[in-house]
Each structure stands twice: as structure tokens, then as C-alpha cells.
Amino acid sequence: MERSSKSSGRRRSKKMAAPIISEIDLARLGDGVVAYIRTMSSEEAKERFPSIDNLPRGLTLYALHAADGTPIALTDTRQAAMSHALGDDLEIATVH
């Protein structure tokens, strides 16, 4: 039996070059529109936000950040961080 020279219905996938984007441009993509919430301990919050005084140890805090990583708010509940984002018309992105 002779094989046909035609392909067996499989298409060759063409590899597309990934677009090149700078880190700065990547951070600006969601500027003013997208935010994310990050959980952190009170100890980590003291390191990241040195201007915070008298923060008790052992707390779980929720930091709302702009798409570029700029901190917007630090709260003690996830709901408060979400409310702040909604009040600023920000869409919350899921970060893993």
C-alpha cells in the first residue's frame, strides 16, 4: 500500500515570536484600572511601610496595590480592601 504525500490532516503550528515589552510598559498596562490585593503579616507590613507606627504583631493585613505595585491602601480585612478598590472603580486581578 502506497502512502499519500498529503499530510494526515495535522496542521503544523507556526511559532509566533512573543512581543517584546519593557517592564515599565507592562506595569502601565493596568494603570488606573486594575489592582490586586496581597495578604501580608503585620511584621511584613512594618518592613514594607516604615511610616506605620504601633502596628501590633501577629496580624494578617490586606494591601491593595495598583497594577504597577504601588500601594494604595492597607487594611485589616479583605472586604475593606475590596470596598476601597470598588470605590476607586478598580478591577481586582487575581494574583497567584
Image: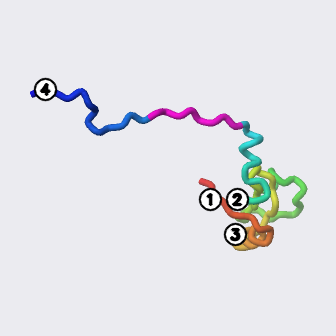
Q: Is residue 15 magenta?
A: yes
How far apart are labels 1 and 2 at the CA level? 7 Å
As drawn, 12 above or below 88: above
Between residue 16 and residue 87, name the one nearer to us: 16
In the displayed structure image, the side of residue 54 where residue 16 appears, left or right? left
- Which quadrant of the structure image shows residue 36? bottom right
Q: Which label sits in the foreground, 4 or 3?
A: 4
In the displayed structure image, the side of residue 14 where residue 96 appears, left or right? right
- The residue at the point 70 percent across, 64 percent down is 91
Please name the amino acid that badge 3 sits on. Answer: Arg
- The residue at the point 74 percent across, 46 percent down is 27
The single residue placed furthest to the left in the displayed view is 1
Please name the amino acid that badge 2 sits on. Answer: Tyr
- Marker disc for residue 94: 1
- The residue at the point 75 percent across, 61 percent down is 64
Q: Is residue 2 magenta?
A: no
Of mark 4 and mark 1, the one earlier in the sequence is 4
- The residue at the point 32 percent across, 38 percent down is 10
Q: Which residue is mark 2?
A: 36
Local crowd size for mark 4, using a 10 Å CA cut-off: few (<14), some (14–19), many (≥20):
few
Residue 87 at what x, y percent from top left?
79, 72
Please name the amino acid that badge 4 sits on. Answer: Glu
- Marker disc for residue 2: 4
Q: Which region shows up in magenta?
A: 14-21
Local crowd size for mark 1, using a 10 Å CA cut-off: few (<14), some (14–19), many (≥20):
few
Of mark 4 and mark 2, the one earlier in the sequence is 4
Of mark 4 and mark 3, the one earlier in the sequence is 4
In the displayed structure image, the side of residue 53 where residue 3 appears, left or right? left
- In the rendered structure, are the residues bearing label 1 and label 2 in contact, judged by CB atoms less than 8 Å apart? yes
Q: Which residue is mark 3?
A: 78
Q: Which label sits in the foreground, 4 or 2?
A: 4
Of mark 2 and mark 3, the one earlier in the sequence is 2
